[in-house]
Image (tube, grey):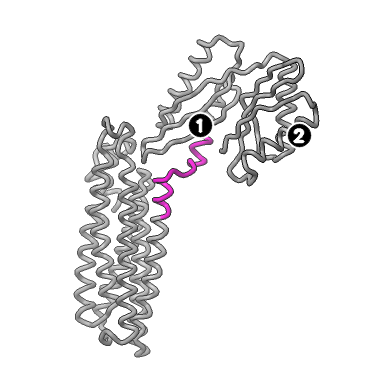
Amino acid sequence: MTGLLCKLFIKDRENVKNSGVRSAYGMLASVVGIVLNVILAAGKYTVGAIFGAISLQADGINNMSDAISQIVSLVSFKMASKPADRDHPFGHARMEYVGSMIVSFFILLVGWELLRGSAQKIFGQAGKTEFSWIMIIVLGISVQIKLWLWYFNNKLAKKIDSSVLRATGTDSLADAIATLAVLVAMLVIKFTGIDIDGYMGVAVAVLIFAAGIRVLNETKNSILGSSPDPEVVDNIKRIVGEFPDALGIHDMVVHNYGPGRTIATLHIEVDGAKCVFESHDMIDLIEKRLREELSIESNIHMDPIVTDDEEINALRALVAQKVKEVDMALDIHDFRFVKGVSHSNLIFDISAPFEVKMSDSQIKDAVAAKIKEHNESFLTVTNVDRV
């Protein structure tokens, strides 16, 4: 069904890097979600009202909020597809993250309303639930539809790497679980006579809250800026490593401006004795491959280093060893040596993962002390880069 819908309604459906195609996928998911959720909401709320089932009515309201969330997704996809302009030179793709955050607020609001209604049922402020097989049929159909929507949204989310569709898929799965819980409550009422409608409503509310918080947290990380995908980093390193004259890579930062809009900045060490034009030509080729193979726009800084001086090579190896003695996770780059009469300066940067708990000043002091142990005349001029 998913493949058929994509084939019927999305032109050039394999070109997922194109903003227009991404928008078409988003619009398809939103329209399908809106139609199905409105149908489910109307059916559940009507049947729940007739038989006094608070959890079924709340589940219907939940579906209506899903329809509203899909409208938000539809708008965010439309806005995200807008091209870059003077006020937004990196495009509008991050609007998808804003849309995901709004969806998460809707999920939390529904959870709160369901919790409030369930509490009223538990404390006797709502009528008794009447059982009907019509409710079971409605709930069973709803579970199947919601599971399909979960599959549908996740498949499209994977296809176009969309946080909005992932959030919507998560919401659909939570809905399916919630609806299944309501169905169980109705069967318990039928076969035991115990009205657990309100208590099941509380359980459903907790599930909905958990789904909303998870979506909100994922979206918050995307907006604030999270660590790049390790696979993206590995692919960048792989491409750079295929150029023999690229002697080292450091200070890599991957900026995510939304799906399909990634910019990377990095430094590449080159032999300072080589022709600068040859090195620059290599940098151009690396940037071209990153653009064509990974769809990453890159800005690469070229760091010339000395490679044919035995003394400097030996000192570089010594410093790298001393830095490892402080913490095996540390590394160095941009090494230079300035020889003097009374003292000599060892100038270098230290790469320190965020997992290293020492402060930057503690790292500098510890490295300086280690090198002083080897030679009192060596002074270190260092900078710590967190990676």
Q: Residue at x 69, y 24 (%)?
A: 346
- Say whether marks 2 and 1 touch (CB < 8 Å): no
**Image check: 254 left or right of 372?**
left
Q: Residues within 10 Å of mark 1 (few under 14, many from 20)?
A: many
Magenta: main secondary structure: helix
Q: Residue at x 53, y 20 (%)?
A: 302
Percent of width and height locating residue 235: 51, 34
Percent of width and height locating residue 208: 37, 66
The amino acid sitting under disc 1 is Ile
**Image check: 216 left or right of 63?**
right
- Write down the residue under mark 2: 370
Residue 229 magenta-highlighted: yes
Q: Secondary structure at mark 1?
A: helix
Vertical arrangement, residue 308 with respect to residue 222, above or below? above
Q: Quadrant of residue 17?
A: top left
- Of residues 254 and 156, the one nearer the viewer is 254
Q: Quadrant of residue 204?
A: bottom left
- Which residue reaches farthest front? 342
Residue 14 magenta-highlighted: no
- Write down the residue under mark 1: 236
Mark closer to the chain start, 2 or 1 = 1
Name the front one of labels 2 and 1.
Answer: 2
Q: Residue at x 47, y 29 (%)?
A: 265
The part of the chain drawn in magenta is 217-234
Mark 2–mark 1 distance (CA, rounded to whole Å): 33 Å
Q: Secondary structure at mark 2?
A: helix
Percent of width and height locating residue 232: 48, 37
Q: Quadrant of the C terminus?
A: top right
Vertical arrangement, residue 155 with respect to residue 127, above or below? above
Percent of width and height locating residue 75: 23, 48
